[in-house]
Structures are given as C-alpha cells and as structure tokens.
C-alpha cells in the first residue's frame, strides 16, 4: 500500500459566514436618486426667469448625483458593519473526492 493511498484525516477550519452588501449597486442607486432630486429642484420648483431650467438642472446634477452616491456608500457601509455583528461562525471539514480525477481530456 502506497503512502498516498492511506486515508488522511480530514482538515477542519473555522470560517465566518455573513451576508455583505455589494457597494456598486448602492452607489448607482444613490447617484440615480440624486439625479431625480436634481430634476425635482430644476423643473418642479419655481425659479428665477433669468436662468434656464436645463442649466439649473446641470448645475444641481453634479452636486446631487455626487451627494447621492456618497449617501449610498454610507448606507452600504452601515449595512456592512451590521452584517459583521450578525456573522455566524462554523467549522467546515474537507471531504476527499469519491471519484479520482482523470487526465484523459474527456469533458462533458
């Protein structure tokens, strides 16, 4: 019997399992919310006749979209910190393959 054929004790590891938010969707959603707020400010509120509504929208778009993205990132960060508190710990064990790998190149 060769040494590689002898049974090996399974390896155990402690892992942490948690649900962490993805930051990009929060940034995009915050930016889109900022665009909506800029549109409401430019087109929904009465303004000065000396300024075109499109230029007002462009001005507020830069600030509101950036501010919305920052707020979205802050919300994602808070949710990430909350997920760290709710994290669960588990012990996993490696399981040897029941069927050995073959190098014959046959793939399904």
Image (cartoon, rainbow, N blue to C red):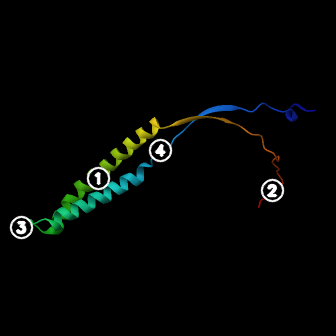
Height in image: 67 above or below 81?
Answer: below
Q: CA distance from mark 4 to mark 2?
A: 38 Å
SS under mark 3 = loop
The earlier-in-sequence mark between 1 and 3 is 3
Instruction: Pick the residue in front: 63 or 99.
Output: 99
Height in image: 78 above or below 3?
Answer: below
Height in image: 64 above or below 74?
Answer: below
Q: Is residue 90 left or right of residue 100?
A: left
Residue at the image point whose x is 26% and y is 51% from the top? 67
Q: Point out which mark residue 20 bears.
A: 4
SS under mark 4 = loop
Q: In the picture, which quadrant includes the C terminus?
A: bottom right
The earlier-in-sequence mark between 4 and 2 is 4
Question: Which numbered mark, 1 or 4, is in the foreground of this view?
Answer: 4
The earlier-in-sequence mark between 1 and 4 is 4
The earlier-in-sequence mark between 3 and 4 is 4
| Callouts 1 and 3 close, C-beta under 8 Å | no
Q: CA distance from mark 2 to mark 3?
A: 74 Å
Question: Which numbered mark, 4 or 2, is in the foreground of this view?
Answer: 4
Q: Point out which mark residue 31 bears.
A: none
Residue of label 1 = 68
Residue of label 3 = 50
Q: Point out which mark residue 105 bears.
A: 2
Label 2, residues with CA under 10 Å away: few <14, some 14-19, many ≥20 = few
SS under mark 2 = loop
The earlier-in-sequence mark between 1 and 2 is 1
């Amino acid at each position: 019997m060769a040494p590689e054929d002898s049974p090996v004790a399974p390896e155990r590891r402690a892992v942490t399992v948690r649900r962490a938010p993805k930051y990009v969707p929060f940034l995009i959603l915050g930016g889109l919310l900022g665009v909506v707020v800029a549109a409401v400010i430019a087109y929904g509120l009465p303004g000065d006749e000396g300024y075109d509504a499109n230029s007002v929208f462009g001005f507020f778009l830069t600030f509101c979209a950036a501010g919305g993205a920052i707020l979205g990132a802050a919300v994602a960060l808070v949710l990430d910190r909350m997920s760290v508190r709710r994290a669960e710990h588990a012990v996993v064990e490696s399981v040897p393959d029941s069927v050995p790998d073959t190098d014959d190149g046959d793939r399904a």
